[in-house]
Structures are given as structure tokens and as C-alpha cells.
Image (cartoon, rainbow, N blue to C red):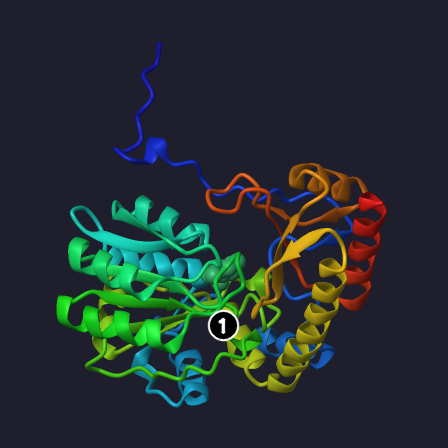
């Protein structure tokens, strides 16, 4: 019999990414924007695509897009790196700064891909844990950094799937520790625009702080796969050394540049989502359900009168898909719902009321 090749050590124990993609009418499971960008965006894109030289390789450093992002963030072009979704940015960071005999500190429960990508790149994952309200305790964080000397620390703010933001005090404390151990603080800000927490540290050459952002949420472009890194030049340069040549196609580069011109649409998405978040929060909390306050475009909740998995399944029968976190460590019995359009949220709330009756 043919002997098939075995995967490299460590990969065999990994489980992959599991978030069911079911054919339902109301999809509130992956924190996408329910609103497409306006029609004018599509028209402009059509025009731009017609003028692209697709027989040529794309601009290798995506310089126009990096410059557009840099201008928005008041940074320099070479403090920006763009990739195919922020997951690819995270992967590039792990390839550049992680790897065998290196470690990444993660505070669970958090975005599952931080540990998954770290492991795929051979980086050892050090698990820190959040407190009962899902906050990272500064002393716990500093002790772990002192003991483990991780090369990377991932912090997600607002945190997925719990919705809370990290405090500026925590971030500054971790940063000052890492500035002396030589570790990199990676602040994943996929949901930043939905948050009220004002923390405006910026990219500084002498500070080991990198921000990861995405076009998948507030920019309504999950389907295009575009994310970016804001970081000191030395960090961007190291990340560039591990990225593939011409990794970002020409169409995607144009999409990003055009999207940034639709700031008003983006802001409307954020405003409507925040209003709807309050509506969904108030409605859920009036039922036998524990709901955590959220600064993102989703809510974590725990039904108290029905098994969470049963509720999740019954919602699918109603044509509504949310995220089942009930078996994740630290999130036992919890579900996460993305804030959708007004209509989608109403359908979701009606269904929950009906099931809980
Ligand atoms: C915290 C966080 N970071 C990154 C991502 C991935 O975003 P992208 O679509 O840019 O890969 C997600 C997606 O849900 C997320 O929740």
C-alpha cells in the first residue's frame, strides 16, 4: 500500500478553523457588516477594474494603498503593511517573530486564530486566562511576561468573543515590560471603530507595539480579504521579509483605496450598529439571559433557562445562524450573536422570545 507523507510535527494535533457556513436566511455568526458599501463604490470599482493591467503583476509593496492608509492614520507609508485579511497579517507576524523555540502569550478566551496561527507557525503558545468578567489582570499579565519572556503578546481590543476593551493602563504596563524584554505587543483592533474606549497610542519607532486592523468589519469588505498592520518601520520590514512576492493582487489594492474614500458610509455602519447593539442588548437582558456589555459588533450571552446548544440549534431551524461558543474553555454555555441589520436583529429577537416561551 502507498505510504502517504505525514504532516510536520505539531500540525497533526491542530484542529483547523470550524465555523459552520450554513445556508440560512439570517447569518449572524461571523461579525460581518450587514451593509454593503454604497452603489457608487461598486460603480467606481467597475471603472477602475476596466483600467487595470491584469496581465502585469501588481505593485509589490501595494504602495498607493499603504500611503492611503498611512494618511488616514497620520503615519508614514513604510509604517504600514497590507495583506489578505488580518489573519494573514497575524500569520506574517508569527512567521517573522515567532517560530520554533519562541512563544506567544495569549489571554483566553479570545480570538481563536491567534493561538491557531501561532501553532501553525511552530510558535509555542503560552495561555494566560481572563478573570470572571473577561478582563486581563495586569499583575497576571506582567508575571507571565516576566516568567515566559514571550516574543509576541496578543491582545484583542475589543476582545472577540467577549466584547470588552482592554484598559489603556493594562496596555501601557504590558508595553513597558515588553520594551525591556524585547517582545512585541500585537494589538488586534478588528472592532476598534465600534468601541468607546479612547486609547490613542501611536506607532513609535522605539515602542514594541503593532496594531492589526481589517477591512472585513466596519469597511463592509469581508469578501475581499484585506487587512493591515500599523507598526514601526523595523517591524514592517521584518514582516515584509516573510511575505510572498506580489502577495496582494491588483484588484484588492484598488478596492482598499476606493473603500477608504467612503468614510461616511463606514461611519453610518458604525452608528447604526451601535444603536442596534443597544436594542439587542436591552431585549436579551429582559429575558432569562445573561448578556455581557460589548464594545464590538456582537454580543456574548448565556441563556439561563435553556441549554445554549439547544437554543443555537433551534435558531438554525428558524433560519438564523449565530456562533456557538458553549463548549469553548471559559465560555461554557455561551453563544455569540453578530449585530445585523435592523430587520435581521428583529427576526433574531422574535425567534429567541418564541423559543424561550
Ligand atoms: C479579533 C479578530 N481579528 C481578526 C479577524 C480576522 O479578520 P480578517 O477577515 O481580516 O482576516 C477577526 C475575524 O473575525 C477577528 O475577530
Count every numbered label the image shows and give the total.
1
Kindly indicate the quadrant of the structure image that contains residue 122: top left
Location of the N terminus (image quadrant): top left
Q: Is residue 26 above or below residue 72?
A: above
> Residue 151 or 285: which is nearer the viewer?
285
Question: Is the residue marked 1 within 8 Å of ligand 1, measured from its CB?
Answer: no
Which residue is depicted at the point 38% across and 36% down? 14
> Residue 266 or 171: which is nearer the viewer?
171
Examine the rendering and report whether any part of residue 173 can be seen.
yes
- Left or right of 57 on screen, residue 293: right
Which residue is depicted at the point 24% across and 78% down? 233
Instruction: Determine whether the residue tagged by mark 1 lies in a helix, strand or loop.
Output: loop
The residue carrying mark 1 is 53
Which residue is depicted at the point 84% across and 54% down? 350
- Left or right of 24 on screen, residue 82: left
> Residue 76 or 177: which is nearer the viewer?
177
- Left or right of 106 on screen, residue 71: right
Q: Is residue 19 above or below residue 68?
A: above
Q: Position of residue 141 (x, y in %)?
A: 28, 61
Amino acid at each position: 500500500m502507498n505510504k502517504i507523507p505525514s504532516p510536520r510535527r505539531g500540525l497533526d494535533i491542530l484542529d483547523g478553523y470550524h465555523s459552520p457556513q450554513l445556508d440560512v436566511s439570517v447569518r449572524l455568526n461571523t461579525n460581518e457588516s450587514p451593509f454593503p458599501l454604497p452603489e457608487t463604490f461598486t460603480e467606481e470599482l467597475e471603472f477602475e477594474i476596466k483600467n487595470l493591467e491584469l496581465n502585469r503583476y501588481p505593485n509589490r509593496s501595494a504602495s498607493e494603498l499603504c500611503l492611503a492608509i498611512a494618511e488616514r492614520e497620520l503615519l508614514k507609508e513604510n509604517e504600514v503593511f497590507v495583506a489578505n485579511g488580518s489573519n494573514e497579517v497575524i500569520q506574517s507576524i508569527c512567521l517573522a517573530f515567532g517560530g520554533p523555540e519562541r512563544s506567544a502569550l495569549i489571554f483566553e478566551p479570545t480570538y481563536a486564530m491567534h493561538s491557531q496561527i501561532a501553532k501553525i507557525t511552530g510558535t509555542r503558545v503560552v495561555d494566560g486566562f481572563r478573570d470572571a468578567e473577561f478582563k486581563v489582570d495586569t499583575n497576571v499579565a506582567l508575571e507571565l511576561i516576566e516568567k515566559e519572556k514571550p516574543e509576541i503578546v496578543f491582545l484583542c481590543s475589543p476582545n472577540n468573543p467577549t466584547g470588552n476593551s482592554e484598559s489603556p493602563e493594562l496596555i501601557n504596563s504590558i508595553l513597558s515590560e515588553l520594551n525591556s524584554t524585547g517582545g512585541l505587543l500585537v494589538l488586534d483592533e478588528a472592532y476598534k471603530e465600534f468601541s468607546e474606549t479612547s486609547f490613542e497610542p501611536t506607532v513609535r519607532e522605539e515602542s514594541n507595539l503593532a496594531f492589526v486592523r481589517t477591512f472585513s468589519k466596519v469597511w463592509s469588505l469581508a469578501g475581499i480579504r484585506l487587512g493591515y498592520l500599523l507598526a514601526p518601520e523595523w517591524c514592517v520590514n521584518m514582516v515584509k521579509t516573510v511575505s510572498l512576492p506580489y502577495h496582494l493582487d491588483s484588484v484588492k489594492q484598488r478596492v482598499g483605496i476606493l473603500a477608504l474614500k467612503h468614510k461616511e458610509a463606514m461611519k453610518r455602519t458604525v452608528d447604526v450598529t451601535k444603536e442596534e447593539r443597544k436594542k439587542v442588548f436591552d431585549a436579551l437582558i429582559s429575558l432569562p439571559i445573561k448578556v455581557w456589555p460589548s464594545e464590538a459588533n456582537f454580543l456574548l450571552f448565556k441563556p439561563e433557562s435553556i441549554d445554549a446548544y439547544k437554543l443555537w440549534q433551534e435558531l438554525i431551524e428558524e433560519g438564523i445562524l449565530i456562533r456557538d461558543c458553549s463548549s469553548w474553555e471559559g465560555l461554557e454555555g455561551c453563544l455569540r450573536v453578530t449585530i445585523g441589520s435592523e430587520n435581521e436583529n428583529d427576526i433574531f429577537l422574535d425567534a429567541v422570545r418564541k423559543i424561550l416561551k
